[in-house]
Amino acid sequence: MDPLIILSVVLIVALLVSGAPFYVAFIACSVPFLIFYAQVPGLAMGAIATEAVASFTLIAIPLFVFLGNIMARIGATRDLFNLARSFVGHFRGGLGITAIVAAAGFGAMCGSGLATALAISSTAVPEMTKSGYRRSTIAAICGSAGGVGLLIPPSLSFIVLGEVLGVSVGDLFLAGVIPGLIVTLFLSIACYFWCRGKEEIKIEARHSWREKCVALIRATPAFLVPVSILLTIYLGIATPTESAAVASVVALLLGLLYYRSLDMKIMRAILNDTARSTATIWMIIMGAMLFGRVLGFEGVPQSGAKFIGELGLSYTAFIFAILALYFVLGMLFDAFILMMAALPPLLGALVLYNVPLIWFGVVFTIIIIIGQITPPVGITLYVSAAGARADVGETIMEAIPYLVALIAAMILITLVPGLIVY
């Protein structure tokens, strides 16, 4: 490998260790290389960076971030939590399972793992602490389940993956449904057995069917959001990007007419959060795209594909080798860095082994979910711990059984490809 590439990677790691944001590290290491070595003019680099986010598909990102912020603030999270609680709250660890199921439902509406973890942990803390749950236990449950939102449509990760892999976002949405339900089930089973050994956790009384019906009626309007997205896509009325705009209008109407909780102060907060989150995501994509040009100039993708091909691995061995690689990278890097910078160099190898790209997109997303709750980064766990005001170290220890459950679900879905339907 070219010494300049090695130097660039070393500089990126050094900047990240020093606390620099991801996009700063990638841009700072890519720009000097492209100017002084590849002789790329500054204006051309600007064009490369802006084209990275000018795609019609990626316009959906600010729309889904906006949608997630609305749903988190109008009260939809509370209604989803109460609905799940009425059906599973009476089991051992029932409120933990409630948080997992509510995270799956909320994730299906906002499409963001981080937003889901923060919203559910903030909502669950008051009720779960009354029932004997420690804050670190709550944060571990909500952080582990927050990533399910990346699998159940709509999903920000599928929007970006559709662009990177060159496949239909709608097909990725459809393919993520069954794996999302499987992951939710495995996390619920882990919660049930983990909580059995905690005598301080109280078991709730069983809810009557009347209470269940009331909770269902109150939560039903919130489901108009994912339904509006999926119907407009699969009936051919709108693209995923346009469906995000439709769903945002639906969420605004819910906030104004049903929840009646939107006012100018809340709207300003929603718009500010949306602008900050979108800017961060787009800067990451821009930086990753510039670094991708550096790798492409040095022929790293082609060399990597050739090297993997010469190893003579079987199809199954190749798949698990790739997943192991991204598992390690997922401990260190943000989801968008993996998708935009670490995935493109291996596309040639995926084509060489005839790996179905939609199937791989789903499995890759599960790896991202695992990486986001795995130290040293574990960003979803950290966000959840902040929302629950829990100790990060204790949260990491409490998350171990859920990490095991996620890995088990990934192995099952990988070995039984028929579970991914598209």
Image (cartoon, rainbow, N blue to C red):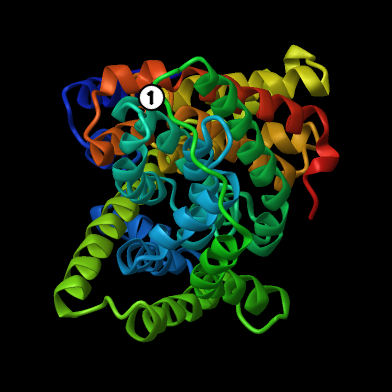
- Closer to the camera, 79 or 389? 79
Residue 98, percent from left and from top = 51, 44
Residue ID at (45%, 38%): 341
Q: Tell me, yes or no, if residue 415 can be seen here.
A: yes
Give the vertical position of 39 relative to 311 (above or below): below
Tell me: 184 left or right of 117.
right
Tell me: 84 left or right of 180.
left
Quadrant in the picture for the C terminus:
bottom right
- Closer to the camera, 345 or 202? 202
Which residue is tagged 1? Answer: 332
Amino acid type assigned to the residue bearing label 1 in the image: Leu
Residue ID at (48%, 48%): 103
Mark 1, secondary structure of its residue: helix
Residue 192, percent from left and from top = 58, 27
Residue ID at (67%, 55%): 172
Residue 410, percent from left and from top = 67, 29
- Closer to the camera, 211 or 249? 211
Q: Tell me, yes or no, if residue 31 can be seen here.
A: no
Residue 7, percent from left and from top = 31, 19
**How many callouts does the rendering have?**
1
